[in-house]
Amino acid sequence: MFTGIIEQTGTLVGLADRGGVRRITIEAPGVASRLREGDSLGVSGVCLTALDPDPKFFHADLAQETLDRTSLGVLAKGAKVNLELPTAAGSPLGGHVVQGHVDGTGMLTALDPVIPESSPEFNRETTDWTLKVRVPENVRQWMVHKGSVAVEGISLTIAAFDGAEISIAILPLTYWRTNLHTLRHGSPVNIEADVLVKLAAMQMQAERNKQMDLSASWLVANGY
């Protein structure tokens, strides 16, 4: 499990298609040196397995499902990715429960500074930002106002949702510490809905189904 608190960014330095999978090589001094062969880690919100790590680089294989469902399938050399190691049991839960199981790929529609760039008070290093992401239809049912969502593996809070697009306030620390500052309008981003919201929705649906079954049984038993 992860919490959506990004430790650092890494740089995609290698891509190779081999035997039905795509092997990526990521330069990440700091994180790479702490990995062992077979360890899990979050790469822009996708749970991957580290292969052949050394103090500076690690590799990971992307299956076709990962290429189809996530933004990793369209990354080019030089792209920045967010990195997070799993959360140890008993550690503080700084963000929210993130599984690394991406639900779908959204599209970044805006990432604008709160203070207009034309303003004399504008400072790119210290301003807050507003992120807007168009969410894929299959994920929209789990978007909750003031609820949590993982975007590119980052634990964020939904400030507004219009039924198709979420708006999120981004602090300067998050903007610069993650890959958000490298993304542009139209960039694909990985979306993982809050697993607790998904579980609650499943329980509510099961209860509704149960009530429907009871009603149908009652009608039949009473001659309707």
Image: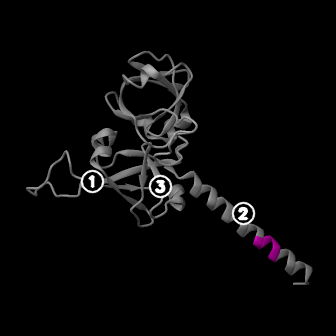
Label 1 Cα neighbours within 10 Å, binned few <14 / some 14-19 / many ≥20 = many
Q: What residue type is labelled 1?
A: Trp
Mark 3 — residue? 148
Residue 125 in sight here: yes
Look at the magenta stretch and give its main secondary structure: helix
**Cβ–Cβ below 8 Å for labels 3 and 2?**
no
* Numbered label attached to residue 206: 2
Identity, as a three-letter code, of the amino acid under mark 2? Ala
Q: How is the image coloured?
A: one colour
Query: In terms of secondary structure, where does tag 3 sit?
Result: strand
Check residue 69 for magenta coloring: no
Of callouts 3 and 1, the N-terminal one: 1
Residue appearing at x 28%, y 41% in the figure = 176
Mark 3 or 2, which is nearer the eye?
3
Residue visible at 62% across and 60% down in the picture: 200
Is 119 on the left-hand or right-hand side of 188? left
In which quarter of the view is residue 132 placed?
bottom left
Image location (x, y in percent) of residue 33: 43, 19
Which residue is labeled 1 in the image? 129
- Where's residue 108, x and y in %? 35, 51
At x 30% / y 50%, what residue is drawn? 171
Marks 1/2: CA distance? Answer: 39 Å
Which callout, 1 or 2, points at the residue further toward the start of the chain?
Answer: 1
Front residue of 78 and 99:
99
Tell me how far mark 3 sits from mark 1, CA to CA: 18 Å
The answer for how far apart the CA atoms under marks 3 and 2 are is: 23 Å
Mark 3 Cα-neighbour bin, 10 Å: few <14, some 14–19, many ≥20: many
Give the image location of residue 100, x and y in percent. Answer: 53, 40
Image: magenta residue range: 211-215
